[in-house]
């Protein structure tokens, strides 16, 4: 696709997203909650309907025509995802329900069977609960020790502090590629290199990066990477784990049951080859097929194009937020081209509770997130209870940002007048 100042990426694609063309409380919907979940294009919705109407059947288990069609489409998505993140082979892509399940898979299959008392796991204070709680379980069961990277004065990942935590006891580093609250783009290439120098493995939570920028797992050299489909235009209930082939081969199965077996006897079983060893039971077939449609859709636009457009939106969002003295944003301010952060802003507005702010903006048709965004430890670290968060995607526009700022100004004025009464 090619775009001009008059024909932006958003204007070119908005017709593909039926949900955006509605009114909320009599106002056009402005959807700024994309870090929580993205909207779905018609191509993805059609893929779901086509499966259920045209070739609904279980995969891998039948020789009839419908089963063959379903299997081809289901496994075809694995090839698409492998290409999308530049995996070396399709066998390095494991379907999961979401990124949380993918992290738990690594935690239970690798962490519980590998880590010993005194081994160290390095996380950061900005981690999503999904990349924290599983490692708490592992530490409790194995005697491993959790350590946490703190933030720089600009509220970014402190690489110097990380380096000071590394030692021969470090066995795992598990961090977000992009913070879902601070929006900072973490220095994962440097982190991975430093971790590997002491023999540690690295898991990347890429939920906020895979949907928004090109990802090359071989160039990054991460050991595992996780992502959720619903944040990248696919349905809920489908995600994936990337893992280096030799690591996945060495890891025992996470769940037992159908599909992940080779042969079953009454007293023992043997297991299927990768990646099916980790995919027990009937999978989310329709959702996986629709994930493939989402990957096709994003690939046709181009992840470089999406990333560049979102950088422009980010600069505009922060320029407009800077006009409001009551607004305090968290995370690094955008640099000249916004290459240092994601297209989201977590913020507070004085004494106005984020839930109240979000509820009032909803009356104007503006959907933002409020709360702790599954980062309670980070909010405690920042000494705040909650934040509001506006998060953008490639179908959003500058005009929507301008309308959001008007709504935000009106909300601040409303609450200010209420406090004066």
Image (spheres, rainbow, N blue to C red):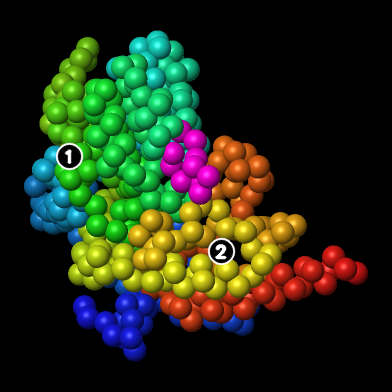
- Tell me which residue sits at (46%, 46%) in the image: 156
Q: Nearer the viewer, residue 13 or 308?
A: 308
Q: Residue furthest bottom?
A: 6
**In the image, residue 300 lies at what x, y percent?**
20, 69
In whole angstroms, how far apart are the C-alphas of marks 2 and 1? 35 Å
- Please tell me in which quadrant of the rendered image residue 41 appears: bottom left
Q: Are marks 2 and 1 in contact (CB under 8 Å)?
A: no
Whether residue 321 is visible here, answered yes or no, is: yes
Q: Nearer the viewer, residue 38 or 155?
A: 155
SS class, disc 2: loop
Q: Which mark is residue 92?
A: 1
Q: Does residue 261 appear left or right of residue 337 in this picture? A: left
Q: Does residue 19 appear left or right of residue 212 in this picture? A: right
Q: Which residues are magenta?
A: 149-158
**In the image, residue 98 lies at what x, y percent?**
37, 45
For disc 2, the marked residue is 368
**In the image, residue 107 lies at what x, y percent?**
36, 27
- Tell me which residue sits at (17%, 39%) in the image: 92
Q: Nearer the viewer, residue 376 or 274?
A: 376
Q: Is residue 197 above or below residue 373?
A: above
SS class, disc 1: helix
């Amino acid at each position: 696709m090619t775009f001009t100042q008059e024909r932006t990426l958003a204007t070119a694609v908005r017709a593909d997203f039926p949900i955006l063309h509605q009114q909320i409380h009599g106002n056009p919907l402005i959807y700024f909650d994309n870090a929580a979940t993205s909207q779905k294009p018609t191509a993805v919705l059609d893929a779901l309907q086509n499966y259920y109407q045209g070739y609904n059947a279980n995969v891998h288990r039948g020789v009839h025509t419908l089963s063959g069609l379903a299997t081809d489409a289901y496994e075809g998505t694995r090839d698409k995802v492998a290409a999308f993140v530049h995996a070396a082979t399709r066998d390095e892509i494991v379907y999961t329900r979401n990124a949380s399940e993918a992290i738990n898979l690594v935690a239970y299959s690798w962490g519980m069977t590998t880590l010993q008392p005194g081994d160290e796991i390095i996380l950061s204070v900005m981690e999503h609960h999904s990349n924290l709680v599983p490692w708490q379980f592992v530490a409790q069961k194995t005697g491993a020790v959790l350590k946490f990277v703190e933030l720089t004065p600009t509220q970014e990942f402190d690489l110097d502090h990380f380096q000071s935590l590394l030692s021969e006891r470090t066995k795992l580093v598990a961090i977000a590629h992009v913070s879902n609250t601070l929006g900072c783009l973490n220095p994962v290439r440097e982190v991975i290199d430093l971790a590997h120098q002491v023999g540690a493995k690295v898991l990347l939570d890429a939920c906020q990066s895979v949907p928004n920028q090109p990802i090359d797992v071989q160039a990054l050299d991460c050991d595992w990477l996780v992502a959720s489909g619903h944040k990248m235009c696919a349905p809920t209930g489908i995600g994936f784990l990337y893992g280096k082939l030799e690591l996945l081969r060495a890891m025992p199965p996470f769940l037992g049951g159908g599909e992940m077996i080779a042969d079953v006897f009454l007293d023992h079983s043997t297991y299927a080859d990768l990646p099916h060893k980790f995919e027990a039971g009937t999978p989310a077939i329709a959702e996986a097929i629709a994930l493939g449609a989402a990957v096709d859709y994003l690939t046709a636009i181009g992840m470089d194009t999406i990333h560049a457009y979102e950088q422009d939106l980010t600069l505009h969002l922060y320029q407009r937020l800077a006009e409001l003295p009551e607004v305090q944003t968290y995370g690094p301010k955008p640099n000249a081209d916004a290459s240092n952060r994601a297209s989201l802003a977590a913020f507070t507005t004085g004494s106005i509770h984020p839930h109240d702010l979000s509820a009032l903006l909803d009356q104007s048709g503006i959907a933002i997130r409020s709360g702790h965004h599954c980062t309670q430890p980070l909010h405690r670290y920042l000494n705040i209870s909650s934040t509001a968060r506006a998060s953008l995607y490639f179908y959003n526009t500058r005009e929507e940002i301008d309308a959001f700022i008007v709504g935000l100004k009106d909300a601040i004025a409303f609450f200010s007048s209420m406090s004066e009464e």
